[in-house]
């Protein structure tokens, strides 16, 4: 690639088939450049409309609305499924990622009574590690966390080598929340299956941006959130996937009325639904589901391949600009160098990452997010971010760093 | 009480100090009379405004909104706490009732390793029974479900007599979802404590309408939803209560990042928050929390005592009208005869309850809800229901029944 200049970025925007969607995501002109769609996606106009419609249905139909709302976990699940290569009847949208991880990991461990080992990633997102830690203790399992390279992550080879015939469950994030390093989903799934282990993928940092083909890879279980690239809103309900032929074999531990067969017969004993609904718990969050439905429909219309194609070009530009403009100021790429090993975000390390990140936000320049101890994550969501935004963001980051940032010693309560 | 006529109902409305709030709950003139606020509360104008504000914050503040949103589970919890007699720092709003029941019942059982028995109500709401059934199986406990009278419910005496020194956990609904029968929360709690049992109250059919004084009764644990009398919207997040001095003694099984001390340090090991936040799981549902906050603030402004006073007069009128107008047509009161044993809704039994209920809804007359096999529940939510609504509803029910309803044999998929 030639040296990136702004004209090159403008040319890429002019050619971008996705660019028309940006107008649906208002409030971007003149504001700080938002490169944090990997943490919380922006609200689209059509999502706000869908929320208003759902509130209108509540007002108008009142309790009668449930005759339609009752199907939302499955129908919105099928829609999310189409973004992650899952055929119908294998995904539901419900609860949050933590609860879904707990349900599926617990169900998997119950189905593997003779096996002692749970395999995870020491660099994984906290909730994933904590859920596994809790379940290991509760079920007398050993949790083995692999330590990957801080910026390159685990290699798919070392993960495969760590799976053995005593492994009950392998639980990994497809894309690392921190470095953006991407694991080989298909080959690791195949390795788990060769050893009789079940595999649970966390797709929080993939869904809606990075291609995933759960059915084709024969994945057992997956979870993910809908508030990052899926743009469902802060705390929107999460999703879970259970491969069709596993559904009747697995039972999750939280026996609630939304998982019950013939729910409204209200019978004396819990008898789980035969299909994916058995992984539901209690009353479905209707407004959140309506938002996710609308938000995911846009991604479906654009297509993950188009989004991924743009994303790869944006992160390549970003990585190159980090090397060219920020490395001379002491920053470094904190994501894999090989684009084939990256997800849809790129991280930058610097000893003063926190005050630098804070100054960029406080001066309304760039919104990224800090991850301790020394990383700023930059996620240019392909649906509404322009190539010039990437270019300008790095230029602003360079200017702030060149002007000098000071560490006051304060650390974020929330990042 | 004299024979109820419409003029008497109108006179009660004219004297009603709560009546001014009705204008906030639109769409009621000329529509079917909504007596189902005990199933799904209506949206108030100020709740819709709060939702719009929250969507605006999402658009405006983006990820930066989390610096405030992060506190919502606890601050909204404190507000809900004020409606159920709970001092600050003992309630959080999160997850759904099923998940909250699971977390608290599981935590309670872990804290009672030597005791074998879980005590519940065979007539309780399905999710409560199913959660206990699942946990009994998973922890090697015996679930003993008491069978109460179908309309009078369990007596507080028989519940107290059933608690023994082998009882780990007593889990009951304060007000029965079906009959509206109300248990004596304080005396049953005291009985549980005399035997060293922990007690978990489901307040779904009390919160926001019936006085509850958790702190004064020394209750251990409680859960409830926010979409009934609390008017938080379909599938709005639920609440949970853990008495302050129990919090550090109990550990819930779903170890997520929102329950972690120093959440954003993202440390290697799960170390739960010392306070009520340890009962949180994953990312908080911000829009739902904003709706609950606004909705509960109105109930707080009115005061539970005023609401309960009106509720009791409405259900007394309703019960009397059922006897006077509907009993001659084969219907009967399916709630306790003693007003002192009722909650805020009243049920009516009839062999043709389902087609009767359906006809009332289809003809835009009265919205109640059917509970199999033969009950229609009527919940006149005191915040927005008038005494004339109660009077007119029974008159309409009488007219439809007198005209004749036919059982087609169809049964509801959703009620």
Image (cartoon, coloured by chain):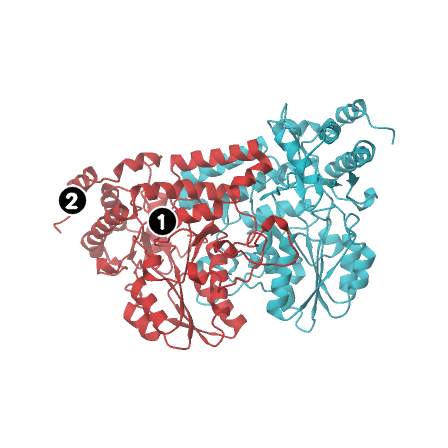
Chain colours: A red, B cyan
User: Regarding mark 1 in the picture, which secondary structure is present there?
Assistant: helix
Q: Is residue B124 visible?
A: yes
x, y percent for residue A194: 34, 72
User: Regarding mark 2 in the picture, which secondary structure is present there?
Assistant: loop
B198 in relation to A38, above or below? below
* Residue ID at (63%, 32%): B361
Read off the chain for label 2: A
Image position of B191 (left or right of B293):
right
Instruction: Work out whether residue B130 or residue B406 is closer to the camera in this orientation and state it.
Output: B406
A59 in relation to A406, above or below? above
x, y percent for residue A68: 52, 40
* Residue ID at (50%, 47%): B285
For residue A341, what is the image quadrant?
Answer: bottom left
Quarter of the image that includes the C terminus of chain B: top right
Q: Is residue A29 visible?
A: no
Instruction: Work out whether residue B14 or residue A239 is closer to the camera in this orientation and state it.
Output: A239
Label 1 Cα neighbours within 10 Å, binned few <14 / some 14-19 / many ≥20: many
Read off the chain for label 1: A
Label 1 sits on residue: A82
Quarter of the image that includes the N terminus of chain B: top right
Image position of B170 (left or right of A372):
right
Label 2 sits on residue: A5
Query: Quick one: which residue is furthest to the left in this view?
Result: A2
Q: Nearer the viewer, mark 1 or mark 2?
A: 1
x, y percent for residue B182: 76, 48
Instruction: Work out whether residue B8 or residue B49 is closer to the camera in this orientation and state it.
Output: B8
């Amino acid at each position: 690639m030639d040296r990136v200049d702004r004209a090159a970025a403008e040319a890429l925007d002019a050619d971008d088939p996705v660019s028309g969607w940006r107008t649906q995501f208002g409030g971007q002109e003149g504001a700080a450049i938002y490169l944090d769609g990997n943490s919380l996606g922006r609200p689209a106009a059509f999502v706000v409309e869908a929320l208003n419609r759902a509130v209108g249905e509540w007002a108008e139909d009142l309790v009668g609305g449930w005759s339609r709302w009752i199907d939302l976990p499955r129908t919105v699940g099928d829609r999310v499924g189409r973004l992650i290569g899952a055929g119908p009847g294998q995904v539901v949208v419900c609860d949050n990622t933590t609860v879904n991880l707990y349900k599926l990991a617990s169900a998997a461990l119950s189905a593997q009574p003779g096996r002692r080992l749970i395999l995870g990633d020491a660099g994984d997102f906290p909730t994933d590690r904590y859920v596994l830690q809790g379940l290991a203790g509760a079920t007398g399992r050993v949790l083995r966390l692999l330590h990957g390279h801080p910026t390159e992550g685990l290699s798919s080879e070392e993960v495969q080598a760590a799976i053995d015939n005593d492994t009950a469950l392998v639980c990994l994030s497809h894309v690392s929340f921190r470095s953006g390093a991407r694991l080989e989903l298909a080959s690791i799934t195949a390795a788990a299956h060769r050893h009789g282990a079940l595999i649970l993928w966390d797709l929080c940092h993939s869904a809606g941006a990075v291609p995933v083909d759960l059915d084709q890879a024969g994945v057992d279980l997956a979870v993910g959130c809908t508030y990052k690239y899926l743009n469902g809103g802060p705390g929107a309900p999460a999703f879970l996937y259970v491969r069709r032929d596993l559904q009747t074999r697995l039972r999750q531990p939280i026996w609630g009325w939304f998982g019950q067969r013939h729910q409204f017969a209200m019978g004396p004993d819990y008898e789980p639904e035969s299909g994916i609904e058995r992984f539901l718990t209690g009353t479905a969050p209707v407004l959140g589901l309506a938002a996710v439905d609308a938000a995911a429909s846009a991604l479906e219309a654009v297509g993950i391949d188009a989004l991924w194609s743009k994303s790869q070009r944006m992160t390549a530009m970003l990585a190159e600009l980090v090397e060219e403009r920020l490395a001379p100021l002491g920053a470094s790429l904190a994501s894999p160098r090989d684009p084939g090993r990256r997800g849809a975000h790129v991280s930058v390390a610097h000893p003063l990452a926190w005050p630098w990140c804070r100054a960029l936000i406080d001066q309304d320049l760039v919104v990224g997010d800090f991850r301790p101890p020394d990383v700023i994550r930059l996620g240019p969501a392909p649906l509404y971010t322009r190539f010039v935004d990437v270019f300008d963001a790095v230029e602003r980051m360079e200017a702030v760093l060149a002007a000098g940032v000071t560490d006051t010693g304060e650390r974020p309560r929330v990042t």
